[in-house]
Image (tube, helix red, strand yellow):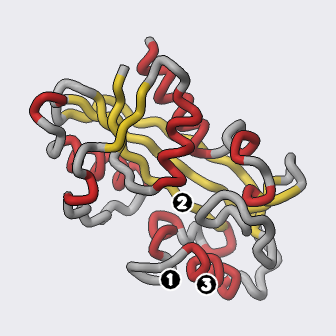
């Protein structure tokens, strides 16, 4: 089965494909980079995932209109910041922020915090023929360290300490992270649904 996804993020695309198995081929939406992105106006990960899936689903090529397409919204919630950066995770330090800038801002805002608990959240929305089919959610709990550690992963991975591993997500191989990550959980639910 061919499944289209609405992301141009290479890190996410690698994770999607690594989790999919041989029976599912995941392809980016054709000409995705030429499509103006929608305004992510949702207040929750669910709202943004659905908004993006429906928007990009309307851009499916005519010959693929009957195929499934999914979009996801994900990010980091930190308890002591009242859930921030939340849906603004990718643009926490501004519209064109780099991972490094986002990480630095997060560390600055947690400089005097004693509660560094947080979680990664991922919500995937699946559409077909312009209609929402279902949503799938995954979360993983952790803590925010005081300085970046590790060179792997992307986003907030150098700051996200996972107690069961005893290290940050950026310090573990991608395949080990994929066993427990928020995205892996949401993808597993999506793929299980499709295989039924």
x and y percent of residue 87 in the render?
Answer: 46, 64
Q: Quadrant of the N terminus?
A: top left
Q: Residue furthest left?
A: 62
Residue furthest toward the right? 166
Depth check, front residue: 3 or 108: 3
Q: Which residue is mark 1?
A: 93
The spot of residue 142 in percent (x, y) is 75, 56
Element under label 3?
A: helix
**In the rendered view of the protein, which quadrant contains the C terminus?**
top left
Q: How many marks?
A: 3
Query: Separation of disc 1 and disc 2 at Cα?
Result: 14 Å
Left or right: 119 in relation to 70: right
Q: Earlier in the sequence, mark 1 or mark 2?
A: 2
Nearer-N-terminus badge (3/2):
2
Residue position marked by numbered label 2 in the rendering: 75
Question: Mark 1–mark 3 contact, CB under 8 Å?
Answer: yes
Residues at discs 3 and 2 in contact (Cβ within 8 Å): no
Figure check: 7 above or below 16: below
Where residue 118 sits, quadrant-wise, is bottom right
Query: How many other residues sit within 10 Å of disc 2, few (<14), some (14-19) or many (≥20)?
Result: many
- Where is residue 21 drawn, in percent x and y? 55, 24
Q: Residue at x 65, y 83 (%)?
A: 104
Q: Which residue is mark 3?
A: 105
Residue shown at 26% from the left, 66% from the top: 39
Side of 69 where 124 appears, left or right: right
Compared to residue 13, the image places residue 88 above or below, namely: below
Circle 1: element type: loop
């Amino acid at each position: 089965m061919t499944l289209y996804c609405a992301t141009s993020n290479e890190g996410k695309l690698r994770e999607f494909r690594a989790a999919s198995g041989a029976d599912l081929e995941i392809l980016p939406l054709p000409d995705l980079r030429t499509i103006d992105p929608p305004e992510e106006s949702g207040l929750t990960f669910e709202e943004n995932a659905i908004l993006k899936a429906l928007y990009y689903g309307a851009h499916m090529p005519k010959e693929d209109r009957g195929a499934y397409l999914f979009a996801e919204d994900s990010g980091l919630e930190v308890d002591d910041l009242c859930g921030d950066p939340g849906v603004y995770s990718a643009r926490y330090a501004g519209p064109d922020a780099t991972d490094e800038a986002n990480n630095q801002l997060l560390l600055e805002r947690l400089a005097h915090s004693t509660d560094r608990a947080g979680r990664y959240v991922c919500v995937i929305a699946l559409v077909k023929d312009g209609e929402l089919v279902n949503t799938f959610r995954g979360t993983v709990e952790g803590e925010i360290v005081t300085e970046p550690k590790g060179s792997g992963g992307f986003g907030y991975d150098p700051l996200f300490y996972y107690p069961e591993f005893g290290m940050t997500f950026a310090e573990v191989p991608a395949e080990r992270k994929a066993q427990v990550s928020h995205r892996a959980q949401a993808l597993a639910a999506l793929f299980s649904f499709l295989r039924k």
